[in-house]
Amino acid sequence: MSNQKARVAILVSGGGTNLQAIIDRWHEGELPHAEPVLVVSNRKSAGGLQRAEKAGIRSEFLQKENFETNLIHLLESERIDIIVLAGFLKILSEDFVKRYPNRILNVHPSLIPSFCGDGFYGLKVHEAALNYGVKVSGATVHFVNEVTDGGQIIAQKAVDVLPDDTPETLQRRIMEQAEWILLPEAVERVAKDIVESGREGE
Amino acid sequence: MSNQKARVAILVSGGGTNLQAIIDRWHEGELPHAEPVLVVSNRKSAGGLQRAEKAGIRSEFLQKENFETNLIHLLESERIDIIVLAGFLKILSEDFVKRYPNRILNVHPSLIPSFCGDGFYGLKVHEAALNYGVKVSGATVHFVNEVTDGGQIIAQKAVDVLPDDTPETLQRRIMEQAEWILLPEAVERVAKDIVESGREGE
């Protein structure tokens, strides 16, 4: 590839703060091997789409109907190397996941294997952690495979649980202290591996 | 109670490094509400017994036969408030555990609920963590109830897993960076609660 960068697509459903963290680190030059070129949302009103537009990144809303077929078409036309699930709340099919082995990254707001798997998403993760009474939680970036939250772990970061935490305050602290740091770092690390092994644009 | 200290018994099976951490912090004045007065082992050769003798703490080896009956006798004669399992590898009966609610502390070398429960002890915990591929592990101090590693969590501390870790190196780092720090702190915290609520010597 001419510019030696892995081309990154980011899938969002909501506000897109994890997307913003990737954009910010990219603008600061901390992702020398990665280039965000596509943001896709399954929700038309997702704040992530506006963040992408503001950063000059192609942004696309895809309807529920034929979502994955249209997504694959977009990914191929943009020659995407890495797919990042950044607050993307739609479950991808096993066929889709198997098409991109070690190319799909997800961020989960706990220290896997604690509080992960089916049923653990969004605030439910933090509710479960507080109900269990853990004093340390955190976030995990992992490759996506056909088992929910079951793919190889790329990076983890611990975050203290405070005595008066609510699911909301814990969620926010884990975003700020772990997710927004880990995810851009993991994207760069995977991008570097892909570029250095000459597997970009496959 | 005259001296306002909770009387602490420590149960050991091995070298007793967690016991030593308690003794060291106690000597340094960091356990103002606790006094280690008894060390019990189910193994005659346990290094913890020598550590106790050196520190001037009563040390007792109890044989397998009638172990719990003899242990209860010792605990009662020494008016023990807090029982600490510090590398104690014998399973205590449900009857024993129910006799001392919120009085028995255990240290487990992982971030519970990861890598805990039946079958997870000693190096097996660290083997499981490395096989899973976690990047963060740690230690947990918890009250003991009738579910293995299922009692209320008192304190947790995260420790990074390094790329070339073996179960042995990870075990050692978790001891040094988490167990030896957490356990004395937890003993003091529980002791302080007991003394301040006037429940010592019950």
Image (cartoon, coloured by chain):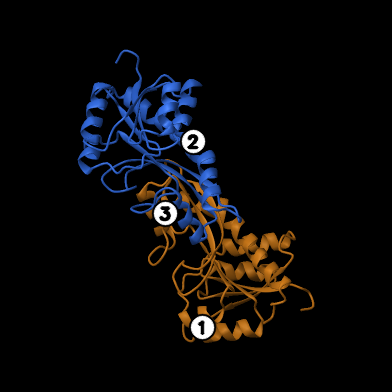
Chain colours: A orange, B blue
Residue corresponding to mark 1: A68
- Chain letter behind tag 1: A
- The reply to whether the C-beta atoms of the residues labelled 3 and 2 are less than 8 Å apart is no
Element assignment for label 1: helix
The answer to which image quadrant residue B105 occupies is top left
Element assignment for label 2: helix
| Residue displayed at 51% across by 46% down | B171
Residue corresponding to mark 2: B180
The answer to which image quadrant residue B119 occupies is bottom left
Which residue is most to the right?
Answer: A2
Relative image position of residue A140 (x, y in whole percent): 52, 59
Q: Nearer the viewer's eye, disc 1 or disc 2?
A: 2
Instruction: Estimate the spatial distance between the alpha carbons at disc 3 and disc 2, rounded to whole Å.
Output: 19 Å
The answer to which image quadrant residue A124 occupies is bottom left
Residue corresponding to mark 3: B115
Which residue is most to the front?
Answer: B45
Element assignment for label 3: loop
Relative image position of residue B127 (x, y in whole percent): 48, 55
Give, as a three-letter code, the residue at label 3: Phe
Of A85 and A60, nearer the camera is: A85
Labels 3 and 2 within one chain: yes
Instruction: Estimate the spatial distance between the alpha carbons at disc 3 and disc 1, rounded to whole Å.
Output: 36 Å
